[in-house]
Image (tube, rainbow, N blue to C red):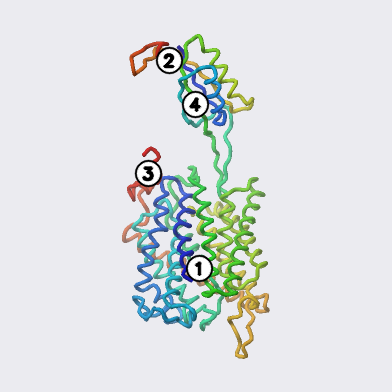
C-alpha cells in the first residue's frame, strides 16, 4: 500500500477531487495548509505598511491506495492539478505498513 | 433632530466599533469594539451629571457654568440661544452623541495595548478636561471661539472639526507616543484581521455622518440640505483621492484605501459642511484624501510612532486641514446667520473677502492642539500613576480579549 500526499493550489482542489472520484478512489482526507516551495510569496500593502506574505494557502490531499493503483492515481492527481505555472505543488509517496478499519478490524488492502 | 441624534450614535456603535474592530488582529477584536461600546455608557452618565452643563451652560470663555447640573432646567422648552425650534432636551441628547464618539475615535491609537480600566479612567478625565471645555469654547454661549454667540475670536466649526476631530486626533498621537509601540511593531506582521467588518463600519460612518453634519443645522432647512450635500461630496472625493494616490504610489487601489479616504473626507468636511458650496466641498474632500494618505503612508513611517489605527493621520490631519480650509471657503451664500446691524449678511471666509478668517481658524486650531496635547499628557500621567496605562506584555501577546475580558471574538469550533 502507498500513501499519496499531494500539496496543490486551492483553486484546483475541486478538480482533483472530481478526478479521483471518476477513477473510483473513495477515501481521501483534505486539509487547508500554508507553505511555499520555490514559488515566491507576494506583497500586501495596508495603509502604506508592506507585508511580505511568503506562506501561501495550499490544499493537502491524502489518500492510501493499493500498490497496483499507484500509477493511475498519482497521474490523475497530477493531471487535474496542473496549470503549468510555478506553485502548482508536489506529490509525495510513502510506504504504508498497514491499515485497520476501526469498525470491524479489517486489515491491509481490505481496509482501504 | 431625534433621527439625527440616533444616526450619530450609530456612528459609534456599530459604525466605529466595526471599522476599528476589523482593523485590529483577531485576538483584540472584542477589546477594540468594547472601547467604543463602553463609551456609549460612560459618557452618557457624565453628560447627565455635569457634562452638558460644563459644555453648554453659560460660564466663562473657557468652560460652561453649573446651571444645567443633573440636567436641571433642560426640558421641553426650547433654548433660544442654541436651537429655538426644538426642545432643549432634544438639543441636549443630540450633543451627547458627539461627546460619545469623540473619545471613541482616540481609541484607535491605543487599541491592542491599553488596559480597560485605564481606558475608562482616561476617558472620564479626558471628557472633563479636554472635550467639555473645547465644546464650550466653540459652541457654548459666551465661548471664546463661538462666532454666533459672542465669542472674542469668531471661528467657524459647523459640526466639530476642532471640537471632535482635532482634539481626538491630536490626543490620539499623544497616546500613541506615551504608550509606545505594540510588542513586535513594526517587525511582526499586524494585518487587519477582517476588512469586511471595516467596510461595513466605514459605510455606516458615512451614513451616520449625515446626522452629524446636516443635523448640526438643528433644523429641517436649506442649511441642513446644504450640509448634507457638502458632506456627501467631501466623502466621495476623498475616497477617490486616497484610492488614486495609493494606486499611483503602491500600484494597486485597495478597499482599505477607499474607506480610509472616505472617513478622512468626512472629517475634513465636518467644520466646513454648513458654510461651503458643493464644489469647494469636493475640493476639500479630494485634498483630505490625498493629504491623509500621505500622513499615514509616509509621515508615520518616517517618525516611527505606532498609531495603531491611524486616528491621528486621519482625524488629526483631516480635522486640521478642514478647519483651515473652512476659513477660505466659508460663504454667506450658504450660511447667512451672521448679520450686521442693518440686517445684511456679513462676509464669512476668504472667498467672501474676509481673509482674516483664516487667521481666526488658525487660532482655533492652535488652541485645540495645545489643549489636546497638554490635557492628554497630564491625564495619561495621572492614569498611569493610579491604575497603570499599558497592559502587561503577557496580556498583550495573548490578546486583550482573552486576558482582559475572558472571551474570544471567534469561537469557530464551538
Mark 2–mark 3 CB contact (< 8 Å): no
Q: Residues within 10 Å of mark 4 (few under 14, many from 20)?
A: many
Q: Residue at x 43, y 82 (%)?
A: B60
B377 or B69: nearer the viewer: B69
Q: Which residue is mark 1?
A: B369
Q: Residues within 10 Å of mark 2 (few under 14, many from 20)?
A: some
Q: Nearer the viewer, mark 4 or mark 1?
A: 4
Residue depth check, mark 3 versus mark 1: number of the one nearer the observer? 3
Q: Which residue is disc 3 drawn over?
A: B398
Q: Earlier in the sequence, mark 2 or mark 4?
A: 4
**Where's residue B90, x and y in %?**
44, 74
Inter-mark Cα distance, 2 to 4: 19 Å
- Where does residue B357 sit, x and y in percent of width and height? 61, 77
The image shows residue A44, relative to residue B391, as above or below, that is above
The mark closer to the camera, 2 or 3, is 2
In percent of the image, x 33 and y 61: which residue is there?
B385
Q: Which element carries disc 2, helix, strand or loop? A: loop
Vertical side of A106 occupied by B247: above or below: below
Are the residues under badges 4 and 3 in a single subunit?
no
Task: Please tell me whether residue B263 is drawn above or below residue A92 in the rendered image.
Answer: below
Find numbered disc 1 in the image and state the secondary structure of the residue it sits on: helix
What residue is disc 2 on? A112
Kindly check if marks 2 and 1 are in contact, taking CB atoms under 8 A apart as contact: no
Residue sitting nearer the eye, B340 or B323? B340
Q: Residue at x 53, y 51 (%)?
A: B199
Residue at label 4?
A60
Q: Is residue B90 left or right of residue B268?
A: left
Decide if residue A49 is in sight here. yes
Q: Quadrant of residue A109?
A: top left
Secondary structure state at the residue bearing disc 3: helix
Amino acid at each position: 500500500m502507498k500513501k499519496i500526499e499531494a500539496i496543490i493550489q486551492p483553486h484546483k482542489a475541486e478538480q482533483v477531487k472530481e478526478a479521483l472520484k471518476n477513477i473510483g478512489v473513495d477515501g481521501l482526507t483534505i486539509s487547508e495548509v500554508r507553505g511555499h516551495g520555490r514559488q515566491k510569496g507576494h506583497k500586501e500593502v495596508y495603509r502604506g505598511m508592506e507585508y511580505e506574505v511568503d506562506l501561501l494557502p495550499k490544499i493537502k490531499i491524502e489518500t492510501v491506495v493499493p500498490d497496483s493503483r499507484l500509477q493511475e492515481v498519482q497521474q490523475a492527481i497530477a493531471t487535474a492539478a496542473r496549470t503549468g505555472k510555478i506553485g502548482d505543488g508536489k506529490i509525495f509517496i510513502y510506504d504504508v505498513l498497514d491499515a485497520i478499519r476501526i469498525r470491524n478490524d479489517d486489515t491491509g488492502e481490505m481496509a482501504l | 433632530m431625534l433621527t439625527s441624534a440616533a444616526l450619530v450614535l450609530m456612528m459609534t456603535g456599530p459604525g466605529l466599533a466595526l471599522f476599528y474592530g476589523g482593523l485590529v488582529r483577531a485576538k483584540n477584536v472584542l477589546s477594540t469594539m468594547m472601547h467604543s461600546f463602553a463609551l456609549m455608557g460612560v459618557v452618557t452618565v457624565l453628560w447627565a451629571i455635569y457634562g452638558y452643563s460644563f459644555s453648554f451652560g453659560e460660564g466663562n470663555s473657557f468652560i460652561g457654568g453649573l446651571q444645567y447640573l443633573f440636567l436641571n432646567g433642560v426640558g421641553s422648552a426650547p433654548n433660544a440661544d442654541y436651537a429655538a425650534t426644538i426642545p432643549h432636551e432634544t438639543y441636549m441628547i443630540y450633543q451627547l452623541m458627539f461627546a460619545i464618539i469623540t473619545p471613541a475615535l482616540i481609541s484607535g491609537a491605543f487599541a491592542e495595548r491599553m488596559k480597560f480600566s485605564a481606558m475608562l479612567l482616561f476617558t472620564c478625565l479626558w471628557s472633563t478636561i479636554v472635550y467639555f471645555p473645547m465644546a464650550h469654547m466653540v459652541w457654548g454661549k459666551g465661548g471664546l471661539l463661538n462666532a454666533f454667540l459672542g465669542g472674542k475670536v469668531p471661528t467657524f466649526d459647523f459640526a466639530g472639526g476642532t471640537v471632535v476631530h482635532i482634539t481626538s486626533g491630536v490626543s490620539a498621537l499623544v497616546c500613541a507616543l506615551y504608550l509606545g509601540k505594540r510588542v513586535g511593531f513594526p517587525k511582526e506582521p499586524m494585518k487587519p484581521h477582517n476588512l469586511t467588518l471595516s467596510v461595513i463600519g466605514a459605510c455606516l460612518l458615512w451614513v451616520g455622518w449625515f446626522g452629524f453634519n446636516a443635523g448640526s443645522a438643528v433644523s429641517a432647512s436649506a442649511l441642513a440640505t446644504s450640509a448634507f450635500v457638502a458632506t456627501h461630496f467631501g466623502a466621495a472625493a476623498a475616497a477617490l483621492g486616497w484610492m488614486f494616490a495609493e494606486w499611483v504610489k503602491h500600484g494597486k487601489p485597495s478597499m482599505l484605501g477607499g474607506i480610509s479616504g472616505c472617513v478622512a473626507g468626512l472629517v475634513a468636511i465636518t467644520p466646513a459642511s454648513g458654510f461651503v458650496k458643493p464644489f469647494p466641498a469636493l475640493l476639500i474632500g479630494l485634498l483630505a484624501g490625498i493629504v491623509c494618505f500621505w500622513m499615514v503612508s509616509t509621515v508615520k513611517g518616517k517618525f516611527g510612532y505606532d498609531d495603531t489605527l491611524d486616528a491621528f493621520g486621519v482625524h488629526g490631519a483631516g480635522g486640521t486641514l478642514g478647519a483651515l480650509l473652512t476659513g477660505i471657503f466659508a460663504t454667506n451664500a450658504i450660511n447667512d446667520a451672521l448679520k450686521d446691524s442693518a440686517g445684511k449678511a456679513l462676509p464669512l471666509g476668504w472667498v467672501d473677502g474676509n481673509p482674516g478668517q483664516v487667521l481666526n481658524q488658525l487660532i482655533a486650531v492652535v488652541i485645540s492642539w495645545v489643549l489636546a496635547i497638554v490635557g492628554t499628557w497630564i491625564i495619561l500621567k495621572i492614569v498611569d500613576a493610579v491604575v497603570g496605562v499599558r497592559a502587561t506584555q503577557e496580556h498583550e501577546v495573548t490578546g486583550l480579549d482573552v486576558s482582559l475580558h475572558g472571551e474570544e471574538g471567534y469561537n469557530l469550533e464551538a
